[in-house]
Every structure is written in C-alpha cells, then in structure tokens.
Image (spheres, rainbow, N blue to C red):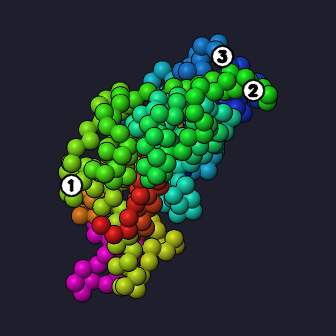
C-alpha cells in the first residue's frame, strides 16, 4: 500500500462512517497522511479525526475509534492505533509488500504514475501576460492539472511578442495558446470559467533570446525551477554538464537508469516482476519513500499551480537514486553473478527512471537516454 492508497483508504472509511450515520460531518475533499516522526508509533499518521471532531460534535478520540473500525480490516493495513488526542497511527503490512505495491504501480502506469482524477470536476481557464515565463509557467500548470483530470483552456492577454516572435520559437518551447485577449465572461454555451491569472516574476528576456542561448530544455527548467514569486536565474550555469547543475543531475540520473537496463540485458538478466522486490537494503529507503510519495507531490503541485515542486521532487529522486546506486550497485561487478538482489535493485532503479522521465515530461522537458 502506497501513501496515496492509504489516504484513499482513510477517506473511504470517512465516507462509510457518514453513509452509515456513525458520523455526521462533511466529508473532506482529501485526507492527508504523513510519515510518522522519529519516536512515533507506526509507519504513517493522520489527523483526520481531529479535523472532523468539531463538525461531528464528538470528541476526537471517539471519531478516531469510529474510523479505526473501518480501516483496520483493509488490505495492506497491519495495525491501526489511536495516539495522543486522536491521531490515527497506521502500521502497514510487511515493508516488502508495500515496496512491491509501489514498484508494481510504477511499472504498470509508466510515465503516468502519479496521475489521477482528483481534479476531474474542475474546468480551469488560465490567463497570462505576453511574456515568456508567464507563458511557460501556464503551460506547465496546464500539464499538471490535466494529469489530475482537470479540463483546461489557456489565454494570453494579447498577441504581442508571442505572434511577433513567430510561431516557431513558441513551438520549440512547447507553449500552446488557445486564445488571445481576455475571454468573455459568458458565451452562447453559458458562463465561462473564471480567469485564473498566471503571473510569475518576468524572465527579463524574450523566447528567442533564451532559445538561442540556452535551448528549449534549459530554458524551461530555468523558468520553472524557481517558485513563481522568485526571479528565475537564466545564466550559462543551466548548460553546465556536471552534477552541480540540477537539470543535468536529473537527466543524468534518468540516462543512468537506462544504461543499467542495457547493461543488465547484456549480462542476461532483467528486473522481472516476480523477482522484485526482495527486502531492500537501508540505503534504498529514501528512494523508495520518494517514489511512494510522488503521486501526492504531483497532486499538491497541481492544486497549488506550482511546477517548481515537481522540479524539486525530481532533484530529490535523482540524489536518492545516486546514493542508492553507489551503495547498492544494481549490476554485478567482476566475476560476480547476477542475483535476486541485483534484479531487485534494478527494479528500483528502473522505477526511479520512470518517475524522472514522467516528471520531466510534465515540465515539458525531454529525458534523453544518453548524455
């Protein structure tokens, strides 16, 4: 069971409790679960009982007991405890089972891992200035919210630079615009969705200037990696072929995962699903936790219109991948024969590569298999 699965399980328990009239409270749109802090009980904790207690007119401890009854028997849940004033603490089944669920989900969903339908009822209209960072940010936000099920339309306040610069430059940056000018409030089909302005700090350069100097991938990363309220550093450091450059680090990590797959094939083995995962060594835990948390990160980034959160997630995955790779090599060395441990490590490395490629795609950045 992944953290996203656990969140849905708890939310389903709330729905059941309300439907059965055991609770009289509005059902929240989502339930947040977090890793238990050091010294705490269980693997994950949730404060939903405290959140519901006031509306339900019950003590939080009583709400927690109602929900525990409906969660404890769910598949993947080993134990549910109530701690403190009403926190639910969850111990999942054996770590190997939880890890397998994460890797199976990544393998089955591929680059769409982390996509979902939480925003499927939303129709969004983003509106941005005729400026390159605003346009690229609006496009990345569109990709994110569409990945969570929303329907989106983008408008630019006026043609300006976007047409004067030529369609070629904007095509290279992967920036579509559905309409120019401020859309009408109503149309023959009825009221339009309210405009959501996209207003990051301007780049201070045109699309053509950035493309000529940096190319499309480095331009998009440079514009999207900082939070929208921060200035975007757009210097030549974005082109440095070294691990101090976060864009290079992320793409190098992905290329390395592909190289591992090719190397394993040359040695005659694969990361067959029935061989993964064996119990992982402790250096793998940070990487496994990041992969398990990826769906939550994507949904949060979509809700907050914050592609910078995806970029930071990819950097964290890349760092964790290299730490894991260096401590637990997925390929045998010397006269060593491929083992179940190597197949398990390869499965984790390939899952990391899938998440990196999918995240880069949401940012509109390519993931080359060779660097």
Left or right: 322 as drawn, with respect to 65: left
Label 1 or label 3, whichever comes before in sequence order: 3
Q: Which residue is mark 1?
A: 240
Q: Nearer the viewer, mark 1 or mark 3?
A: 1
Looking at the magenta stretch, what is its main secondary structure? Answer: loop
Q: Which residue is mark 2?
A: 187
* Image marks 1 and 3: residues in contact by CB distance under 8 Å: no
The residue depicted at 47 percent of the width and 29 percent of the height is 129
Could you tell me which secondary element the residue under label 2 belongs to?
strand
220 vs 27: above or below: below
63 vs 339: above or below: above
Q: Nearer the viewer, mark 2 or mark 3?
A: 2
Q: Is residue 272 visible?
A: yes
The residue depicted at 36 percent of the width and 46 percent of the height is 208
Dot 1: within a 10 Å radius of its alpha carbon, few (fewer than 14), some, or many (20 or more) residues?
few
348 vs 217: above or below: below
Q: Quadrant of residue 224?
A: top left
Image: magenta residue range:
328-343
The residue depicted at 38 percent of the width and 64 percent of the height is 368
Left or right: 369 as drawn, with respect to 114: left
Location of residue 148 in the rendering, given as x and y in whole percent from the top left corner: 59, 42
Q: Which residue is mark 3?
A: 56
Could you tell me which secondary element the residue under label 3 belongs to?
helix
The residue depicted at 31 percent of the width and 45 percent of the height is 209
As for residue 336 lying within the magenta part, the answer is yes
Along the viewing direction, whichever of 354 and 209 lies nearer the viewer: 209
Furthest residue toward front? 164
């Amino acid at each position: 069971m992944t953290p996203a699965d656990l969140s849905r399980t708890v939310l389903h328990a709330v729905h059941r409790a309300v439907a059965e009239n055991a609770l009289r409270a509005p059902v929240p749109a989502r339930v947040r679960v977090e890793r238990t802090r050091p010294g705490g009980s269980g693997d994950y904790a949730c404060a939903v009982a405290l959140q519901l207690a006031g509306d339900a007119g019950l003590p939080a401890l009583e709400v927690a007991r109602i929900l525990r009854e409906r969660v404890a028997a769910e598949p993947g849940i080993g134990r549910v405890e109530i701690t403190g004033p009403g926190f639910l603490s969850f111990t999942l089944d054996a770590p190997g089972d939880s890890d397998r669920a994460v890797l199976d989900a990544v393998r089955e969903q591929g680059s769409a891992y982390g996509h979902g339908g939480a925003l499927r009822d939303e129709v969004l209209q983003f509106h941005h200035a005729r400026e390159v960072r605003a346009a690229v940010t609006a496009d990345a936000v569109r990709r994110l919210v569409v990945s969570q099920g929303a329907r989106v339309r983008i408008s630019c306040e006026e043609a300006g630079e976007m047409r004067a610069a030529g369609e070629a430059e904007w095509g290279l940056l992967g920036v579509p615009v559905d309409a120019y000018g401020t859309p009408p409030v109503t149309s023959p089909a009825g009221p339009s969705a309210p405009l959501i302005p996209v207003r990051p700090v301007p780049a201070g350069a045109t699309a053509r200037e950035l493309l000529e100097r940096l190319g499309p991938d480095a331009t998009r990363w440079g514009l999207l990696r900082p939070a929208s309220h921060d200035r975007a550093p757009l210097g030549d450091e974005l082109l440095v072929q070294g691990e101090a450059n976060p864009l290079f680090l992320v793409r190098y990590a992905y290329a390395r995962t592909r190289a591992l797959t090719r190397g394993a094939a040359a040695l005659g083995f694969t990361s067959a699903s029935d061989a993964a995962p064996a119990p992982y060594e402790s250096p793998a835990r940070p990487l496994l936790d990041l992969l398990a948390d990826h769906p939550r990160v994507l949904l949060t980034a979509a809700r907050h219109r914050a592609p910078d959160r995806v970029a930071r997630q990819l950097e964290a995955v890349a760092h964790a991948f290299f730490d894991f790779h260096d401590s637990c090599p997925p390929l045998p060395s010397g006269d060593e024969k491929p083992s179940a441990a190597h197949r398990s490590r390869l499965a984790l490395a390939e899952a990391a590569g899938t998440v990196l490629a999918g995240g880069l795609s949401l940012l509109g950045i390519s993931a080359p298999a060779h660097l």
